[in-house]
């Protein structure tokens, strides 16, 4: 299917690359279907693009590319809704925020994607040792 994307114009998305967020993403609950797009020239940053609304798009990053010892504290009962007891197909991302004076990412509320079941969810914990605006000073390219 051809979609209009915020950053890349028209993009062809295969059905098997559509990720379903049953409850949407907090603040964007009405948009439930997304796809992860590569950003040309970057091995670290990707784009989480809404299938249904071209202007709903997020730059995302693997949180371990920001902090080597990043830890996720999500209850088993919460992750079961997308993981089906198999964590081998799980990818974790943090949403990046780009402003005029800095680039930050939300390490507090990770986006979890199961690439086998094509389900995703943003987890917002009651408390966390991480910030929603963790400054990214430098990033390392994945080896």
Image (spheres, helix red, strand yellow):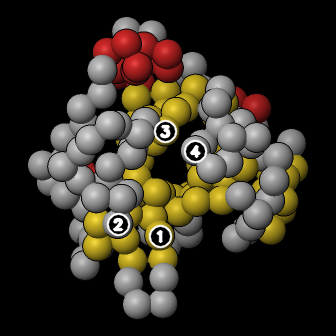
Q: Which of marks 3 and 1 is nearer the N terminus?
A: 1
Disc ID at residue 133: 2
Secondary-structure class at tag 3 = strand
- State if disc 2 and disc 1 touch (CB < 8 Å): yes
Q: For mark 4, what is the residue? A: 26
> Along the horizontal axis of the image, is 25 left or right of 34?
left
**In this rendering, does residue 124 appear at all?**
yes
- State if disc 4 and disc 2 touch (CB < 8 Å): no
Q: For mark 1, what is the residue? A: 97
Q: For mark 3, what is the residue? A: 122
Q: Earlier in the sequence, mark 3 or mark 2?
A: 3
- Of residues 76 and 141, the one drawn nearer to the viewer in this rendering: 76
Disc ID at residue 113: none
Residue 27 percent across, percent down from the top left: 62, 50
Instruction: Name the image quarter holding residue 5.
Output: bottom right
**In this rendering, does residue 13 appear at all?**
no
Quadrant where the image shows the C terminus: bottom left
What separation in Å lies between label 3 and label 1 (alpha carbons)? 16 Å
Q: Earlier in the sequence, mark 4 or mark 3?
A: 4
What separation in Å lies between label 4 and label 3 (alpha carbons)? 7 Å
> Along the horizontal axis of the image, is 67 left or right of 90?
left
What separation in Å lies between label 1 and label 4 (alpha carbons)? 15 Å
Q: Which of marks 1 and 2 is nearer the N terminus?
A: 1
> Along the horizontal axis of the image, is 28 left or right of 65?
right
> What residue is rendered at 82% in x and 46% in y?
52
């Amino acid at each position: 299917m051809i979609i209009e994307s915020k950053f890349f114009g028209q993009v062809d998305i295969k059905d098997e690359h559509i990720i379903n967020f049953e409850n949407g993403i907090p603040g964007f609950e009405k948009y439930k279907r997304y796809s992860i797009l590569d950003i040309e020239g970057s091995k670290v940053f990707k784009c989480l693009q809404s299938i249904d609304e071209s202007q709903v798009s997020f730059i995302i990053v693997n949180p371990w590319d920001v902090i080597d010892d990043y830890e996720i504290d999500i209850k088993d009962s919460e992750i079961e809704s997308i993981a089906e007891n198999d964590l081998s197909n799980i990818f974790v991302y943090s949403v990046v925020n780009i402003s005029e004076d800095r680039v930050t990412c939300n390490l507090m509320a990770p986006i979890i994607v199961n690439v086998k079941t094509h389900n995703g969810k943003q987890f917002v914990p009651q408390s966390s040792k991480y910030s929603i605006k963790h400054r990214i000073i430098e990033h390392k390219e994945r080896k």
